Image: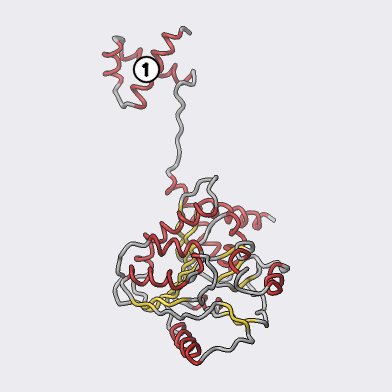
Amino acid sequence: MASADLWQLYRIADSYYRRGRTQEEISRKENISRSQVSRLLDKARDLGIVRIEVNLPEDLEAEPLKGFLKQHLKLEKLILVPAEKDWDDHMTADAIARTAAAQLPRLLKGSMVVGAGWGETMYRTAAALKHHPIGGDPLVVPLIGTSGSNNPYLQINTIIDRLSDNLGGDSFFANLPAFREKNVPFTAYENKRLNMLHEYWNHVDTAVFGLGSRDSGKGSFDEEVSPASQQRIWETDVVGDVLAQFFFEDGSFLPKDGSYHTNAFPVERLKSLPRSICLAGGPQKADALLAGARSGFFKTLITDTRTAGLLYDKLRSEMTQ
């Protein structure tokens, strides 16, 4: 076909499919009949100048996936964030955090004592949260102690401060280390603060926290615990951690190390809270999320579509075995 004819096909197809002109308008502009326009549009499709795709919108496409995962993981709420295949961990955390920041005021409505965890997604969520008071003057308390490292994602008091300020509530800063060697005693002041924190923990009605994979903890705890304690963790087949408490595929926990205290809300108690919200995603966390959901550590999950697809595949694979 002559290039002039191909150019006419392209011009007509572009006018019709991209610019939204009617066949009648095109026929007048091209000085040809309307039936000729229709035939030339068919020819443009036959030659591949026009390729028509029909795609289900992402929000609708995700609905069957959400229904399947909610049912099989016994979740009350599942919020999926569209994710690209080439995203790294930081991009995934940022996308989840932005969605979580938009959803938390609604999810936390009616909460009186909100417990918050640490981690990159939690830190980014607190940073992205807009001022949106949820009413009732809620108290936001840490679910884990402070970190002595320079890692901003582990600065629990920063997270607590931003959450409480933007949710229109108060905050409690424990100022207690997340990890402390057992041979170092607590001061009288620290014991007082620790007792106050435990009392607040007894009244937590909503927990918001992240979840770590087996490997993500390696960069988090290297400044917090001894090399021997680290080695003890990495030599096991734990799949992840919540609030620095490592768990296995069956939901059981790695026994506590006898060399140090961990100041953290007991993960087992998350199961009995009215609301427990996990913010986590990324392919490397799929095994941990699967085990955590099955164990009832959280009732609401905000994750990305790529991770949700992996969870779906794992569940389907188990069902066909």
The total of numbered circles placed on residues is 1
Could you tell me residue 165's position as x and y percent? 33, 70
Q: Which residue lies furthest to the top in this view?
A: 2
Give the x, y percent position of residue 175: 47, 80
Label 1, secondary structure: give it: helix
73 relative position to 82: left or right = right
- In front of the other: 307 or 235: 235
Q: Residue at x 48, y 61 (%)?
A: 121
Instruction: Give the percent coordinates (x, y) of residue 231.
Output: 71, 70
Q: Name the residue under label 1.
A: 11
Q: Pick the residue in front: 286 or 235.
A: 235
Please indicate whether residue 92 sits to the left or right of residue 228 in the image: left
Give x and y (percent) for residue 208.
45, 70
In the rendered view, tell whether residue 73 sits above or below residue 198: above
Which residue corresponds to the image point at 49% horizontal and 76% vertical from the top-left? 143
Position of residue 175 relative to residue 5, above or below, is: below
In the depicted structure, whether residue 308 falls above or below residue 181: above
Name the quadrant containing residue 35.
top left
